[in-house]
Amino acid sequence: MSLLELKNVTLKFGGLTAVNDVSFAVEEGEVFALVGPNGAGKSTIFNMISRFYTPYSGDILFEGRSILGKAPHEIAGLGIARTFQNIELFEQASVLQNMLVGRYTHRRSNFLTELLFTPFVRREEHRHREAVEKAIDFLDLQPYREKLIAGLPYGVRKVVEMGRALAIQPKLLLLDEPASGLSVEETQDVAFWIEDIKKVMGITVLMVEHDMHLVSSVCDRVLALADGKKLALGTPREVQTDPRVVEAYLGSDTEEAA
Amino acid sequence: MRIVFKTTYEADIRLFKHGAQGFWYALLLIVAIAAPFILGDFLTGEATNVLIWAICGMGLMLLVGQSGQASLGHAAFMAIGAYSCVLLESAGVPFILALPLGGIITGIAGGLFAMPVTRLHGIYLAIATLAVSVMMEDVIVLAEPLTGGVNGLMAADIEIFGINFNRYGNASGLYWLILAIAILIVLAYRNIQRSPLGRAFAAVRDSEISAQAMGINVARTKAMAFAISTFMTGIGGALMGHFAGVFNQETFNLVISINLLLMIVIGGLGTIHGAFLGAVVIGFLPQAIAFARDGLGHLFHFDSIAIPGLETGIFGTILILFILFEPLGIYGRWVKIRTYFELFPFARRDMFRRQKSYLKTERIR
């Protein structure tokens, strides 16, 4: 059984078919990438998995069960964490608080015990903090722990968002353009982190990425999309040499492949 | 500048950041407790009034500052608190039970109200809550058999275990009682702030979309914020009813709602200190204006006539000046001054300049 499976998923916005009959399966323990030119439907697929959009037809299965009956806030509890293309952090909170929000699905205290801040809540806070500290150590975020997001540079925000997703301790991590806007060195770091997320933490990764270097260095399989349709599926090398992909993506838009 | 060297996670969980901070708050508490001995009955009464405002203000602060939702209708919830508490008392429930019950009734009303209304954002939410405040006045007048209509209700003296807390007979007793309630509310507020629920409020405030992706039920969290907020405000309203002695729909009219919002903006949004500092301004400003008017009247030899709208005008001017020059309120200004001295002579002018924020996803809400 695949960890995540999309079956003939179609999504229409009015007359525009954003995703057209796309099927693919992400196996446990792999790094899977969605590539394609702008407007190919990659982020739309992410938003369907997050349940912000409901597919027009088709089904999305996570661990063999359909998630289409779930509300958006129930997705994280299943073990699916995500980041956003345009960074969606909590601006007026510190890095630490942002990452602690990632522990919300692990909340066992309720409103009354929290109001009284009982010893149980205190112990829970320590437990959450420990999990967050692990993510902080993993991503080298120690210098920024107390800083407000509003004052942080773009590159650090990207990493914080990844850390917040890791704090959920998910089974599946959705990364929406983890390397966009990052320098070469920062992209290197992201590549190493994704390797470790897969090998050390055992988390399956599904990502959208334009940087083909990053894709070919960390991904096991790649799905190429164009105009909402599936073009090719295979190893990074296979996909990059597929004539249809070259025509639709690399051929027509060479700068992006660089 | 003090640098706190953190060695345990407790350093981020406990109430005071370091020992000196605990010391200053302990000193403040002692001064607050000793105040009636120095102030005399009249000023003690005024201080009590300020505390009641601060309790109501903390309720609104939790909603606006923590969960990012505006409300122009909190006077309506003060009214619900006051009427339910006093009606419970006249049904024979002792004050010590009637007060929290009044708060809980208000909290339930607030939560129920929030369920449909919190789908709205910003100005639309403000208008919806404004409508509640307007309607509440009419509801109180119409529900005359229960509320006494325009004649209002009379709140009996507060009595706990045989001790009478009358505004005139036992001014310091009433002050201490309300101080204790205010401290309990501050503690509850702080506990929410440092627990998962408080972080969920901040998450909903800053990005609903990513709050959902983190597993937070946005509608439920907003309703929760409304319920807790109106609970606190309801308690404040009940205390205000008792403090006033007699109250009717006019005691909780629209102006009170607006004053509450003014208060927390002037005090400093998002901070407990802000609720108290704003309450001091709102509580003492009318007195200060009257005082200044009398003084000027003597100086320039004109009778101290009432100038209609003067108070509202001055409030409005103060609010506009704050929004223009100090959006962080009195508390924000205090933090700046403190930082300046802590870092002296290294403080820079731009240290508190707002950083530009990056593009946010607007396509999906």
Image (cartoon, rainbow, N blue to C red):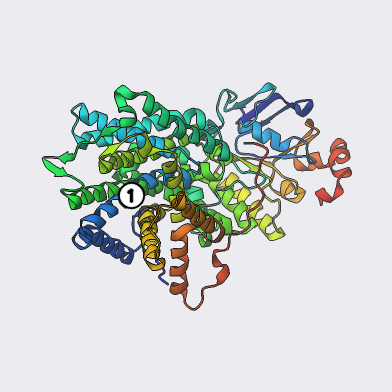
Quadrant of the image containing the N terminus of chain B: bottom left
In screen coordinates, is A25 left or right of A243? left
Q: Name the residue located 72 percent from the left edge and 46 percent from the top edge.
A: A215
Q: Mark 1 points at which residue?
A: B186
Q: Image quadrant for the C terminus of chain B?
A: top right
Residue at the image point whose x is 85% and y is 44% from the top: A250
Rendering quarter of residue B136: top left
Residue at figure coordinates x 47%, y 48% from the top left:
B65
Q: Which quadrant of the view contains residue A42?
A: top right
Please give left or right for residue B96 compared with residue B327 in the image: left
**Can residue A172 be seen here?**
no
Q: Where is residue B71 drawn, in percent x and y? A: 48, 40
Q: Which residue lies furthest to the bottom in this view?
A: B345
Q: Residue at x 56, y 34 (%)?
A: B120
Q: Note whether B154 is above or below B35 in the view shown.
A: above
Q: Residues within 10 Å of mark 1 (few under 14, many from 20)?
A: some
In the image, residue A68 sits, relative to residue A165, either above or below, namely: above
Please, which residue is most extreme toward the left here? Answer: B162
Relative to B363, is A100 on the left or the right? left
- Badge 1: chain ID: B
**Residue A20 horizontal/vertical position (percent):** 77, 26
Secondary structure at badge 1 equals helix
Residue A180 visible in the current orientation: yes
The kind of residue on which mark 1 rests is Val
Question: What is the count of numbered marks?
Answer: 1
